[in-house]
Each structure stands twice: as C-alpha cells, then as structure tokens.
Amino acid sequence: MRSRRPAATSRRCPRRPGEDLVHTLLNAASDHALLLRRDGTVLACNRSMAAIFHLDPGQLAGERIYDFFPLETARKWAESVDRALDGQDCRLEENLIPGLDLETRMHRVTGADGEPDRVAVFSRDVTARKAAERERTRLASAIEQTADAVIVYDENMRVEFINQSFEALTGYSLKDVRGCEPSTFYVGPEQRRCLEEIMDCLARGDIWTGRVSNTCKDNKVIRCEKTLAPIRGKGGSILGYVSVWRDVTEVEILERQLRRAQKMEALGTLAGGIAHDFNNILAPIVLLADIGLCRLPEGDPLRSVFERILKATKRAGDLVRQILGLSRRHESDHPMPVRLATILEECLKLLRPTLPSTIVISLELETKRDVVLADPSQIHQMVINLCTNAAWAMRGSGGALELRVTERDVPKGGDRSFPCVAPGPHVLLSVRDTGHGIDAEHMEHIFEPFFTTRGDGSGTGLGLAVVQNIVDQLRGGVRVRSKPGSGTCFEILLPRSEATAQAIPELSPVPLLEATDGGRILVVDDEVEILDACTMGLTALGYEVTACSRGEEALSLFRDAPHGFDLALTDATMPGMTGPDLVRELLKIEPHLPIILASGHSDLVSREKAWKLGALEYLDKPYGMDQLVVLVRRLLGRGRRSGGEGA
C-alpha cells in the first residue's frame, strides 16, 4: 500500500451544511469510516480510518483514497464505488496492510437534489475473527483427520459432530446420529450400566476415562478406551461434551495372550518342578503292573485289577504331559506333512465305541488339500479333547457331533476372526455340537488352565488349554462360537502345507513273553523302585541284568569289563554323575555301545539331545515294559557285541 502524507497546501473541499454532524457521526462509529465522491476523493473520515494510513482526519480529507492503495486494490474500490452509486450492495474483504483484515461495506448517499453523489464506506476490523476462524478450521481439520474417533455432544448430550475415524470405527454417519443420545452406542444391560456410570461422573463435573464395550451400526461389539469430558466456556459454564474413542479390541486380545503366556510360564516352572518326581513315582507302578499282568493267565480275575492300575497310571501320566505341554514346545514333537482327514478318521474310530449311541457323529471333507505340517500326536490330542468336550456337553440328551474340513485363504490384510494368523492358504477344521452351549460369562476363561464348568469332578480343566497351546505351536488360530442352548462350534485354522503327506508310522508291539536270545544289560537309576522293577521284568524275559543306583558305580563296573555288557539303560537326572555325563564316558570306552537314555522330565534332556550325546533311544517316564522291551530287542537285534574274557 502506498502511504504518502499530503503537502501542507493540500486542497480542501468546502464543507457542505451539516458536515460537522457527519464528522461527529463518523467519529462515533465503531468501524473505520469514509465519505467519498465517485472519483474517490475523501470528503470526510473518522480518526480510526485515518490512523490506518498514519494520518490525521484533516490530512486525509481532499485526497484520492485510491492513491494510497496498490493498483489492484484501487481498481476494486473504484468498481465498488460505481456499483454502490448505482444502488448495488457492495462488500469487500481485504488485507490493506499485513496483519489487518478488513470487511468493507459501501452505501450510496443522496444529495440535496435527490441524486446519489457520495458513497459512505464502513470498514470493520475482522482480524481477530479471521484468526479465530482459521484456528477453528485448523482444529476442525485436526479433529477430522485424527486417527482416534471423536464425538461432540451439545449441552443436552445430543450428538452434534463426529469425525471420519468415528464413522469408520462404528459405521454410523453424522446424518445417522445427529441429535441422538449416547444410548445409541450402548446396547444391552452391561453396556447400559457402563453408560450410567459415565453419566454419573459427568453429572459431578468430572472427566470420565476407562474401557467399555460399544455396539456398532452392524451390531458388532468393539472394546474402546475412551475419555469423555465437559466443554467449558467462560465462567465454567458447560457448552457441551467431547468424547475420544480408541479401538482396543485387538489390543485386549494381545493383552489376554500376554497374560496367558505369563500364566503358562509360571505353570511350566511349577510343572517342571514336580514332573520328574511324579513320573519317577509312576514308573515302577507301570512296570510292576505290566509284569504282574504278563504273569497272570487269561481269565484270572486279578488281570482286571492290574488293567485298572495301568489305566489309572496312564491317565496320571497323560495329565503330567498335558501340564508340561501347556508351558513349552517339546523337542520330542516331530512335525511332518500329514493329511488332517487321515487323523480325524483315526480319532473317530477310537471315539465311536466310547460315546453314547444317542450322539450321531459325522465327518464332512470338503477338500482334499488338507495337508498340515504337525506332529500327528498333537493333532490327535487336539481333536480328542475337542470331541470329548462336545460329547460331555450332549450327555444325557444326545445330539449331533459334526466335524468339517474346508479350505480358507487368509488375505494380506489379515482375518479379524483369527487376528494372529499369517496371510496365506489354510485348512479350517470345525467341530460343532448341539449341546447346552457356553455361558457368556465363561467364554473369556475357557482356554485358561484348570478352568472347568464340570461340576461332577470329571474334568481337569486342561483340555481346551492344551488345544490352544497346540494351535499356537502350529502357528494357527482358534475361534469359538456358542450360545446357551444352541450348541458350540470350535474352528481351528492351520497353515496348509504344499508338501506331500507322509504315512503315519506305527509301532507294532512285541509280545512280552516271546522267547529272547538274552543279553547283558546295565541298568542305572537312582530310584530303587524303578531299578528293582526293570531288573525284575528284564530278568523274567531272559536278560542278564546288572543294576546300579549311581553313575559313578556303573562307570567303574564298565571300565573293569567294557565288553561285559550288550546294552545300557540309564536315567538322565541322578545325583553326582548325571545320565548325559555317563553316556559320554561309556561311549569314550566303547563307541558302539547301544544306550537308552530315560527321563522323568528335565530341561537338559530331550530325544534330540539324547541322539546328539550318542544314545540311540530315548524313553519318557513312566514307560511300560512293552515300550522298554521293544527298544531293547530293536537295539540288540542290530548285532550282539561279542564278549571278551572279562565278560
């Protein structure tokens, strides 16, 4: 803007009658005011208008206002003055000097002859208003584009505004909810109780923060972490309320998984501490029961007693293995490509005789591409647990148990039903029953170890925890859908393998009383009961047994007669010299000695570690005589080591 101070001899326009009144009125106006001729000559102005140009009102009078403006602004003003004199409404918004925004209005003024010959100009300083508008625009843009969902209520708690994130999260548009009350988003008794708590907090003038469940437009329930606070004006009056929502549905899933992992770690520590001793207690019971069962003739009433003992010890051993399986992946698991259908058919063969005839079992295979990479025993255990749970839910009344295998591709964006499953081809196993269903209050806890709803004491509460653990190990996902009275459906999603399925190996048990060629066996275990049971059983089958309760004693005997033994069986965890140390020392003396390493439970020993040490076989306690004899005959069948003079 060109600003020039007029010369001292500036021309003055003679005042017309009443112009003193005009000056008085102009100075009283709150706006910047001018009185112009058509050519832009200033007839009068108030002090605030002259101050814009750093002049006194008398210095601006008689000057052409256009000479103080840039050419483009002068042109717009001249056109506006002409339009005003023609009776048109003229409004301008301009920035005459940096930091000063003016809103200008022009009105024609009629002279004494009744003809319009002057224009009254009023310019209002709207700098603060424009700044506030820009601030509001920036704030509205920030709220609109923020990742968190924002909803604004008026003072009567009715929806006034929602941003794009809120619409994306809930599915509601502003048109859908404008003027609605908060109860629109809180459906059902539990959500309404949370809403009452929120409203009570706001009524006290406080800010509410917490996590609640909300129902979307499509009836999907989400978990939100939110803040709801009053919007206060001057003097503390409440102008409305603002609520910020953040979707934590998947976060809570991850938090539950973390809590579960922590529980599993604690459980693993506890289980590892008791498993070794517990299995060592079970081991002689199993071995002695096996021996007793083999020595009794068919038809002897005592056989049923020993069979019940073996059944009970097997259940106890399975319980320990399940507890251990919850905490960590066993290195003894042997993943291989197997067809899911093959394992399901085997499981159903075992289940059909044990389930009531009132339960109808069906298997539907909708795909032949059902190969997964897993240990067959894992899949077997998972399916048996799911099916026995389903059968228990249909006890008494009967029903239908349906197993279905289909294909399912997980897209790159993931699957909300199975949030932890990686994208790619998968096999979906569904196990559905028509039982009594699961109550909503129990759904959150069904995969927790030792949680059970069976009031008759028949459940350990480990079945579904084991299922969850196996699915996690296989990098899959599990989902359950259930309603009380409408049955339950478990869906297991496992990564599909493109490899060719392998045949599942089977062990053919060897009759215990079959004649043997004998052999010399060194048995080492610090548990006297196990040592006596192994000695008794192997001796009865024709083997020559030397028993030692300490590793140092066994090593000394072997050094004295290195060719006096055809095979060694040693426990892993012993005081003094441990089983792995004994294996190393024995193989230093005789590298071709067949060795079986046994363990009740130890983090230091596994099947793979036993092989790396040089032991040819590994046994988990409690083991039966049939398992032991199968391994002994297999190893001795590879060729009897010739004895020397010290044999």
Image (cartoon, rainbow, N blue to C red):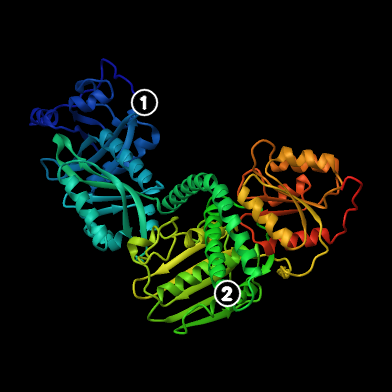
Front position in the image: 165 or 299: 299
Question: Looking at the image, which residue is at 22% across and 49% down?
Answer: 198
Please indicate, yes or no, whether residue 636 appears anywhere in the rendered image. yes
Circle 1 Cα neighbour tier, 10 Å, few/some/many (<14 / 14–19 / ≥20) = few
Q: Evaluate whether residue 77 shows in this view.
A: no
Number of marks present in the image shown:
2
Q: Secondary structure at mark 1?
A: loop
Name the spot of residue 85 as percent of width and height, x first: 22, 45
Q: Which mark is residue 405?
A: 2
Tell me what residue is drawn at x 68 percent, y 57 percent.
536
**Residue holding disc 1:** 2
Residue kind at label 1, given as amino acid type: Arg
**Among the 4 quarters of the image, the one containing residue 202:** top left
Which residue does the image show at 22% across and 35% down from the upper left?
124
What amino acid type is highlighted by mark number 2? Val
Measure how far apart labels 2 and 1 are at the Cα level: 85 Å
Does 331 sit above or below residue 176? above
User: In this view, which residue lies farthest toward the top?
Assistant: 8
Q: On the image, which quarter does residue 95 sit in?
A: top left
Give coordinates of residue 288: x percent, y percent. Answer: 61, 60
Q: Alpha-carbon neighbours of circle 2 within 10 Å: few (<14), some, or many (≥20)? A: many
Q: Nearer the viewer, residue 165 or 576?
A: 576
Image quarter hosting the N terminus: top left
Q: Image check: 423 left or right of 567?
A: left
| Camera-nearest residue between 119 and 258 | 258
Q: Residue at x 81, y 60 (%)?
A: 518
Residue 435, compared with residue 27, is above or below; it is below
